[in-house]
Image (cartoon, rainbow, N blue to C red):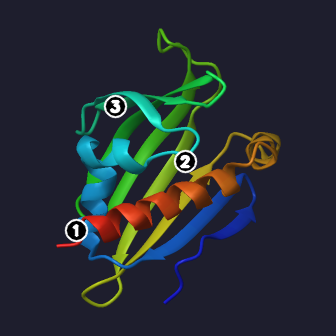
Amino acid sequence: MANELVVEVADREIRMSRTFSAPREVVWEAFTVEEHLVQWWGPPEFPVGYSEHDFREGGSWYFELHGPDGMKSCNLCRFDVIEPPSRLVVQNQFVDEQRQSLAPAVGITMTFDEVGASATAFEMRSRFDSNEARDQQLAMGVAEGFGETFDRLAEHLAAHAR
């Protein structure tokens, strides 16, 4: 079973997919329950240092990733569509500590598909305003960062297997 991140680049899009060795409901919970999210979100050197989570359509997740050099990255993720346990549609953007936008929001659709009884095929499709914005994210290492983040998720899922 493939458990490596697959990255595809298309017009104004980055698609990332990976299969996780856990039932869909467990992977869904890891993505939607703050107690789980803060344990695995972000590359290992940029853990979540602060989080406010209001998981409902129209709600949001504000979180700060704290880097080893003291750098802080603030993000605001607004939940547009929540269809348990198969689909999330969000708008994510970098913000300052007052939650004012620093960059245009990126539309992200996440899907969770069952692969038998004990695995989940996950896809995250990020839609940008332009190919330049997409390429800027790629140059900043978004694919590598999500590769590390999803490795952390796989470890989290294994540690919390039911």
User: Left or right: where does residue 145 sit relative to residue 48?
Assistant: right
Element type at mark 3: strand
Name the disc covering residue 60, or none.
3
Q: Of label 1 and label 3, which has the lower sequence position? A: 1
Residue 12 at x, y percent in the picture: 72, 52
* Residues at marks 3 and 2 touching, judged by CB atoms closer than 8 Å: no
- On screen, residue 158 above or below 131: below
Label 2 sits on residue = 44
Is 21 in front, or is 133?
A: 21
- Dot 1, how many residues are within 10 Å of its Cα: few (below 14), some (14-19), or many (20+)? some
- On screen, residue 104 above or below 95: below
Q: Is residue 86 visible?
A: no
* Residues at marks 1 and 3 touching, judged by CB atoms closer than 8 Å: no
Q: Nearer the viewer, mark 1 or mark 3?
A: 1
Indicate the amino acid at tag 3.
Ser
Q: How far apart, in angstroms, are the residues tagged by discs 1 and 2?
A: 25 Å
